[in-house]
Image (cartoon, coloured by chain):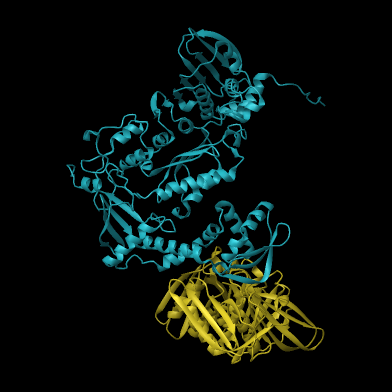
C-alpha cells in the first residue's frame, strides 16, 4: 500500500498555467487581453499581426505610454498590476484590465516577449518568458510604445493545444475579438493582418456610431439608423446604430453591445431593445444593433466572470427603461423607410467629402451613408430588369468620411436624401399594380405600398387607441381564483389595481402577497385567469402601465381582427380609396410594418430609376 | 385479408370515426383506422389514445386478417365510390379497394403497430334512457370550457349517489368559469351507486353524434378511469378527466331578491338583434331593469348603438348590469319552457336562469362589468 500523497504548494509556473486556463483559452483570448492592455496604456494606434490563426505568432504593437524598464519583470508576475492598488479601486475601475493575471498567464503557456519604451525615454527594455520561466530584462532600441509577441501558444501544454481548431477558425475568433474591441474604442486605429495579408482595418472614428458603421457589412450599414440618448440625472448615455423598422435577420450575430467601453453580453439590455421593436419584429426574426451604453461604473459589476464577458447591473430596471425608451424614440422618429435599390455614385462624380468635420450630425451622415446601399450585382430589381450596380472597391476600414463622400448629391436635389415619410413632400397616388400594390410618387421617390399590410397597420392602431379610450368589459368569474405572487410582483400589481379594473381585470388584495381574481377582460376570457394575471404582471414590469401591459396581451387578438378587416391583395382600389389609405398611413405611429412585422413600404429612389436608364446627367 | 361489403356500411363506419382520428398527429399510425376481418364481420377501430371507437359491420370475409389505412383518405375514397359492393384486399403492405370499375391502391401500415382497443371491464352502468342522456348532454354541453388550461373545465361532471336500490338523482354539470349549467334527472338504480366523473369534451361530441344517428337503445357506464358508451354494434371508450371540479354548489345563491320572467323566443330574438352592435370581439350587453321593463343596450363607438325594450313583470328597485349576450342566447336556445325566470341579487352577483319547462334545470351566468 502506498502512502497517500501529501499536500504541498504548487510551483509558481504551474499555478500560472492553471490560471491561464481561465483567461487563455485560444489565440483570440490572448489578443483580447493584450488589446485591453494596449488601450489601458492610452494607445491611439494598434497593430495586430497574426500567423496561423495566432497559434504560431501574435504580435501586438501599440503607441501607448509604455512600461517602465524596472516594471517589466514585474508585469509578467501574477497579480501585478498598475491599474488598481486597493480593493476600493475595483468598483471604480475604468480600465479594461485590472486583475494583473493576463501577462503571467500568457507567459506561462507560450514564448512571450515584451518590448517597451516609455515616452521620451532614451532606451527601451525587453523581457522574454518561456513557459513562465526566465524573466530577465535586457535593453532594447527606443521605439515608443509597447510590442508584445506571443509565439507558440500552448507549446508546453499539449492537452490545451489539442483543442485549438483549424487556422481559419482561430483566425475568425481573433478577427471577431479585434472587431469587438474596436467597437469599445472608436477613437483608436486598429490594423489587423493575418499571415502578412491585410485583414481588418478600422481607422480612428469620431464616435461610436461611426465605428459601428465601419464594422458592419455595407449592405447592413445602409439599413441602420442612429440612436442617441442621454439621461444626465442617472449618468446614462446610449449611442449607436440599430436596424430600421422592417429590416430583420434570422440570427443574432449582428448584435453588439458595449458597456463602458467593454464588449459584453447582457440579457436585460438585449431584452430592452427587442421590447422597443414590438410589432416591428416578425416572430423568430432579430434586429441588428450596435449599441454603446455608458453607465456609472459603480452600477456595473464586471468582475463576474474571468473573461469579463458577463456583467451584472445593479439598476437593471432603470437601464431597461432607458434603453427601451431610447431605441423606441429612434424607431419612432424614423420615417424614411427604405428598401433602397440605389446605385452608388462612382467616385468619378467628384463629390466633395466632408473631411473631418467633427461637428457633422451623425444622424445625417448615416443617412447619407445609407444612400450608398447596395444591390448585389446582377440581382433582379423590382422593375423586372437587372441592376448594373457597380460597387466601388472600398479599402477595408475606409473611414465613414470616405463613405459619406460617396453619397450622390446631384445638382438641384436636396442633400438630405433620407427625407421623412410624412414630411413636406405631398404624396401623389400613381395607381395600383397587380391589385396588390399602391404606387405613390412623393418628392424624389417612388413608394410601393402593400395595400393589405398598410391597411392592417392602420386598423390595428385604431383598435389600440379605442382600447385605451374605452377600457374593456370585465367578465366576472363564477368562482374567484386566488393567486399568490412574489412580493415584488404583488407590490407592482397593487399599484395598478384600479387601472387594470378599467381594462376588465378585477383583482383585489387577499392578504399578504395573495390576490383574488374576480373578473377577466372579456376578449381574453377563454384563457386561464391565473396564467393571465401572471402574464400581466410580467408585462407590467417591462412596460410600466396597465394599458400597455394589456395591449401586449391583446396584441395577437387585435392583429387578427385588423388582418381580417383589412383590404386584401387582389382587391381593386379606386384612386380616392388609395389616397385615403396613404393619408391614414401617414398618421400611424409605425408606418413601416404590419402588426405581424411584415413590411408596408418599399422605396425606389430617383437615382435608382435614373441609373436603370443610364441617365446620369442633371435632374 | 380480403373482404367484400356494401359501400353504405363501410361509409357509415368510416364517417363515424372521423371525429376521433386527429388530423395532425405525431404518431402516423394514429391517423389510420384499423380494419379487422373475422367471422363476425369487419371491425373498424380508431383511437387518439384518449378515445377509442369500435364498430362491427356486416361483410363477406373471404380471408380474415387485419390492416390499417389512412382514415381520412379511405373515407374520401369510399364516399366517391358508386353504390354497390366494395372489395378490400391486402397484399404485402398495399391494399386494393375495388368497386365497379374503380380501383385504388393504398399504402397501409402494419396492424400489429396499432394500439389495442381497450376492453373495459366492470364498468358501472348508469340506468338512463337514450332520450334522457341526449337531453342532459344537450342542456349542459354548451357551457363546457373550450381549450381551457384548467382541464377539468373542458368536460362535464357526472354525479349520482344512491345508498340502495330505488330512485336516485343523476346530475350533469358544466362550466367554463363564467357560466354554469346543471341538469338533474331521476333514475332508478338497482343497487348502491356512487359516481363522480368528468367526461371530456371530445367524448361528449362523439356521444352526441352517435345519439343523434338513430333511435336505438344506448348505455353508458363508468370505471375508475373511463367512460364506456355503447349502442348497437358500437363501443366508445374514453378516458375521464382527472382533477377536482370547481365547488359550483357554493356559487348558486339560495335566495334572490330580483326576479324577472322572460318569454324565451322573444328574448332570444332581442339578444340577437342587440348584439349586432356589440363592441368588437366582445358580446357585452347592458341590462337595465326598471318597473316592468328590461332594456338591453349594446354599443360600438365606431358603428353605433342598439336598444331593445322587453316588457317584463318586475317590481324591484332599478338596477343595471352587463352580460355576455352569447351566454344568455346559449341557455335560451336550450331550454324547453316557453319562458324562463331570471333571478339575481345585485349587479355583480351571479344571475340564475330557470327553465319554466324543466324544474330539474338551472343555468347561471356571471355578470360583466362594463
Residue A267 visible somewhere in the drawing: no
Give the colour chain A carries in the figure: cyan
Q: Quadrant of the N terminus of chain A?
A: top right
Is B40 situated left or right of A28 in this image?
Answer: right
Query: Where does the image place residue B257, in percent across and percent down from the top left?
Result: 69, 83
Q: Which chain is yellow?
A: B
What residue is drawn where x is 60% and y is 21%? Answer: A81
Identify which residue, A418 or A604, lies in the foreground: A418
Q: Quadrant of the C terminus of chain A?
A: top left
Task: Please say if A40 is above or below B342.
Answer: above
Q: Specify the quadrant of the image occupied by residue B200.
A: bottom right
Query: Where does the image place residue A536, in percent across and percent down from the top left?
Result: 59, 58
Query: Where does the image place residue A599, in percent across and percent down from the top left?
Result: 38, 55
What residue is drawn where x is 50% and y is 49%? Answer: A274
Q: Specify the quadrant of the image occupied by residue B35.
A: bottom right
What residue is drawn where x is 38% and y is 60%? Answer: A453
Amino acid at each position: 500500500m502506498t502512502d497517500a500523497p501529501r499536500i504541498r504548494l504548487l510551483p509558481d509556473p504551474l499555478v500560472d498555467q492553471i490560471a491561464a486556463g481561465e483567461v487563455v483559452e485560444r489565440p483570440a483570448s490572448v489578443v483580447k487581453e493584450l488589446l485591453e492592455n494596449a488601450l489601458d496604456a492610452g494607445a491611439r494606434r494598434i497593430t495586430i499581426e497574426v500567423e496561423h490563426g495566432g497559434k504560431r505568432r501574435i504580435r501586438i504593437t501599440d503607441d501607448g505610454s509604455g512600461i517602465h524598464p524596472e516594471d517589466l519583470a514585474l508585469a509578467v508576475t501574477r497579480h501585478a498590476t498598475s491599474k488598481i492598488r486597493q480593493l476600493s479601486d475595483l468598483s471604480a475601475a475604468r480600465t479594461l484590465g485590472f486583475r494583473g493575471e493576463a501577462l503571467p498567464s500568457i507567459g506561462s503557456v507560450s514564448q512571450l516577449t515584451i518590448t517597451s519604451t516609455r515616452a521620451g525615454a532614451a532606451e527601451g527594455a525587453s523581457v522574454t518568458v518561456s513557459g513562465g520561466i526566465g524573466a530577465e530584462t535586457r535593453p532594447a532600441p527606443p521605439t515608443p510604445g509597447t510590442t508584445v509577441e506571443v509565439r507558440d501558444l500552448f507549446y508546453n501544454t499539449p492537452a490545451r493545444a489539442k483543442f485549438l481548431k483549424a487556422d481559419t477558425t482561430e483566425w475568425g475568433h481573433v478577427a471577431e475579438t479585434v472587431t469587438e474591441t474596436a467597437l469599445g474604442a472608436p477613437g483608436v486605429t486598429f490594423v489587423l493582418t493575418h499571415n502578412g495579408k491585410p485583414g481588418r482595418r478600422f481607422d480612428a472614428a469620431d464616435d461610436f456610431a461611426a465605428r459601428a458603421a465601419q464594422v458592419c457589412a455595407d449592405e447592413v450599414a445602409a439599413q441602420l439608423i442612429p440612436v442617441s440618448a442621454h439621461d444626465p440625472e442617472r449618468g446614462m448615455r446610449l449611442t449607436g446604430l440599430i436596424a430600421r423598422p422592417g429590416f430583420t435577420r434570422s440570427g443574432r450575430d449582428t448584435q453588439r453591445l458595449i458597456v463602458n467601453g467593454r464588449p459584453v453580453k447582457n440579457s436585460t439590455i438585449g431584452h430592452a431593445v427587442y421590447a422597443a421593436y414590438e410589432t416591428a419584429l416578425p416572430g423568430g426574426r432579430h434586429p441588428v444593433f450596435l449599441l454603446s451604453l455608458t453607465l456609472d461604473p459603480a452600477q456595473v459589476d464586471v468582475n463576474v466572470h474571468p473573461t469579463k464577458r458577463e456583467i451584472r447591473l445593479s439598476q437593471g430596471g432603470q437601464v431597461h427603461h432607458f434603453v427601451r425608451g431610447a431605441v423606441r424614440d429612434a424607431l419612432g422618429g424614423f420615417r424614411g423607410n427604405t428598401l433602397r435599390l440605389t446605385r452608388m455614385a462612382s467616385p468619378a462624380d467628384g463629390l466633395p467629402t466632408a473631411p473631418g468635420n467633427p461637428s457633422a450630425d451623425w444622424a445625417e451622415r448615416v443617412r447619407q451613408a445609407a444612400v450608398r446601399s447596395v444591390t448585389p450585382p446582377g440581382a433582379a430589381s423590382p422593375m423586372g430588369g437587372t441592376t448594373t450596380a457597380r460597387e466601388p472597391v472600398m479599402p477595408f476600414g475606409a473611414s465613414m468620411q470616405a463613405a459619406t463622400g460617396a453619397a450622390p448629391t446631384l445638382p438641384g436635389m436636396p442633400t438630405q436624401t433620407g427625407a421623412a415619410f410624412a414630411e413636406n413632400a405631398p404624396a401623389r397616388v400613381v395607381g395600383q399594380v397587380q391589385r396588390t400594390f399602391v404606387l405613390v410618387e412623393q418628392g424624389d421617390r417612388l413608394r410601393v405600398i402593400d395595400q393589405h399590410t398598410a391597411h392592417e397597420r392602420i386598423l390595428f392602431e385604431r383598435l389600440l387607441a379605442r382600447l385605451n379610450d374605452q377600457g374593456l368589459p370585465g367578465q366576472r368569474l363564477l368562482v374567484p381564483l386566488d393567486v399568490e405572487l412574489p412580493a415584488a410582483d404583488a407590490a407592482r400589481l397593487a399599484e395598478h389595481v384600479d387601472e387594470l379594473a378599467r381594462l376588465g381585470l378585477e383583482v383585489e388584495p387577499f392578504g399578504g402577497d395573495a390576490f383574488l381574481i374576480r373578473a377577466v377582460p372579456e376578449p381574453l376570457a377563454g384563457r386561464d385567469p391565473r396564467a393571465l394575471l401572471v402574464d400581466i404582471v410580467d408585462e407590467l414590469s417591462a412596460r410600466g402601465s396597465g394599458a400597455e401591459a394589456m395591449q401586449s396581451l391583446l396584441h395577437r387578438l387585435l392583429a387578427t381582427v385588423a388582418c381580417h378587416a383589412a383590404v386584401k391583395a387582389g382587391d381593386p382600389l379606386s384612386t380616392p380609396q388609395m389616397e385615403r389609405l396613404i393619408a391614414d398611413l401617414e398618421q400611424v405611429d409605425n408606418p413601416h410594418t404590419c402588426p405581424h412585422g411584415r413590411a408596408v413600404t418599399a422605396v425606389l429612389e430617383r437615382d435608382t430609376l435614373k441609373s436603370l436608364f443610364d441617365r446620369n446627367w442633371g435632374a | 385479408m380480403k373482404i367484400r361489403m356494401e359501400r353504405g356500411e363501410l361509409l357509415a363506419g368510416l364517417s363515424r370515426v372521423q371525429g376521433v382520428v386527429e388530423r395532425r398527429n405525431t404518431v402516423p399510425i394514429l391517423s389510420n383506422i384499423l380494419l379487422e376481418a373475422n367471422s363476425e364481420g369487419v371491425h373498424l377501430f380508431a383511437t387518439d389514445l384518449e378515445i377509442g371507437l369500435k364498430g362491427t359491420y356486416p361483410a363477406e370475409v373471404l380471408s380474415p386478417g387485419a390492416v390499417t389505412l389512412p382514415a381520412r383518405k379511405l373515407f374520401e375514397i369510399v364516399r366517391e365510390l358508386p353504390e354497390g359492393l366494395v372489395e378490400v384486399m391486402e397484399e404485402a403492405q398495399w391494399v386494393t379497394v375495388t368497386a365497379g370499375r374503380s380501383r385504388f391502391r393504398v399504402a397501409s401500415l402494419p396492424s400489429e403497430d396499432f394500439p389495442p382497443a381497450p376492453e373495459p371491464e366492470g364498468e358501472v352502468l348508469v340506468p338512463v334512457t337514450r332520450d334522457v342522456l341526449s337531453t342532459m348532454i344537450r342542456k349542459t354541453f354548451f357551457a363546457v370550457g373550450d381549450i381551457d388550461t384548467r382541464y377539468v373545465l373542458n368536460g362535464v361532471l357526472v354525479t349520482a349517489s344512491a345508498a340502495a336500490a330505488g330512485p336516485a338523482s343523476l346530475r350533469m354539470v358544466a362550466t367554463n368559469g363564467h357560466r354554469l349549467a346543471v341538469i338533474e334527472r331521476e333514475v332508478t338504480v338497482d343497487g348502491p351507486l356512487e359516481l363522480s366523473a368528468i367526461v371530456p369534451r371530445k367524448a361528449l361530441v362523439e356521444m352526441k353524434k352517435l345519439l343523434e344517428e338513430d333511435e336505438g337503445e344506448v348505455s353508458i357506464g363508468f370505471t375508475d378511469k373511463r367512460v364506456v358508451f355503447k349502442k348497437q354494434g358500437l363501443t366508445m371508450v374514453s378516458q375521464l378527466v382527472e382533477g377536482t371540479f370547481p365547488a359550483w354548489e357554493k356559487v348558486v345563491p339560495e335566495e334572490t331578491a330580483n326576479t324577472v320572467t322572460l318569454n324565451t323566443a322573444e328574448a332570444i330574438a332581442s339578444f340577437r338583434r342587440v348584439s349586432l352592435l356589440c363592441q368588437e370581439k366582445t358580446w357585452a350587453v347592458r341590462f337595465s331593469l326598471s318597473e316592468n321593463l328590461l332594456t338591453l343596450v349594446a354599443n360600438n363607438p365606431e358603428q353605433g348603438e342598439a336598444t331593445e325594450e322587453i316588457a317584463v313583470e318586475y317590481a324591484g328597485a332599478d338596477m343595471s348590469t352587463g352580460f355576455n349576450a352569447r351566454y344568455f342566447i346559449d341557455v335560451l336556445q336550450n331550454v324547453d319552457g316557453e319562458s324562463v325566470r331570471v333571478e339575481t341579487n345585485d349587479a355583480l352577483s351571479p344571475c340564475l336562469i330557470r327553465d319554466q319547462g324543466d324544474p330539474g334545470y338551472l343555468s347561471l351566468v356571471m355578470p360583466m362589468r362594463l
